[in-house]
Amino acid sequence: MMDLGLLGITISGLLIGIGIYGLSSTSNIIRVLLSSEIILNSSILFVFSYSSMVGMVYKPIVFSLFAIGMALTEVVVAFAAVILYYRQKDKLEVE
C-alpha cells in the first residue's frame, strides 16, 4: 500500500509536468495562466505531502495559506491584464 505522502508527491510531480507542458505548448493567454496556476497548486500539494511524511504540522499550513493568498492576488492582476490586452489587440494569442 502506498503512503499518502508519497502519493501526494507523485501526483504533484505529474501536475508539474502537465503545467510545464501547458506553458510550452500553447500561445493562448488563458491557457498559460491556467498552466501556471497548476504549477503553483502542485507546489503547495508537494509541501503538504512532504511535511506529512516528515512529521511537521503547522509550518506548512502557514506557508500554504500564504501561497494561496499570493495565487489569488496573481489571478486577479493577471485577469485584469488579460482584459486590457484583449481590449487593445482584440485577440488572446501571445505572439
Image: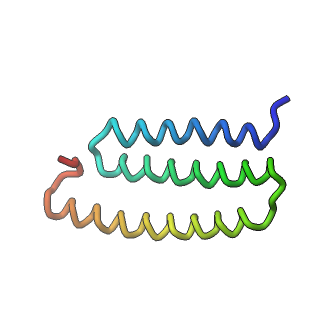
Residue at 15 percent of width and 56 percent of height: 90
> Which residue is nearer to you in this view: 85 or 63?
63
Asked if residue 76 lies left or right of residue 53, the reply is left
Q: Position of residue 81 (x, y in %)?
A: 29, 66
> Which residue is nearer to you in this view: 41 or 76?
41
Q: Position of residue 21 (x, y in %)?
A: 41, 36
Residue 59, by quadrant, is bottom right
Residue at 21 percent of width and 59 percent of height: 86
Q: Is residue 55 above or below residue 75?
A: above
Figure quadrant of the N terminus = top right
Q: Is residue 52 above or below residue 26?
A: below
Q: Position of residue 50 (x, y in %)?
A: 73, 49
Asked if residue 1 lies left or right of residue 30, the reply is right
Q: Is residue 56 above or below residue 23?
A: below
Furthest residue toward left: 89
Furthest residue toward front: 54
Asked if residue 41 lies left or right of residue 24, the reply is right
Residue at 57 percent of width and 65 percent of height: 67
Q: Is residue 86 above or below residue 28?
A: below
Colour scheme of the picture: rainbow
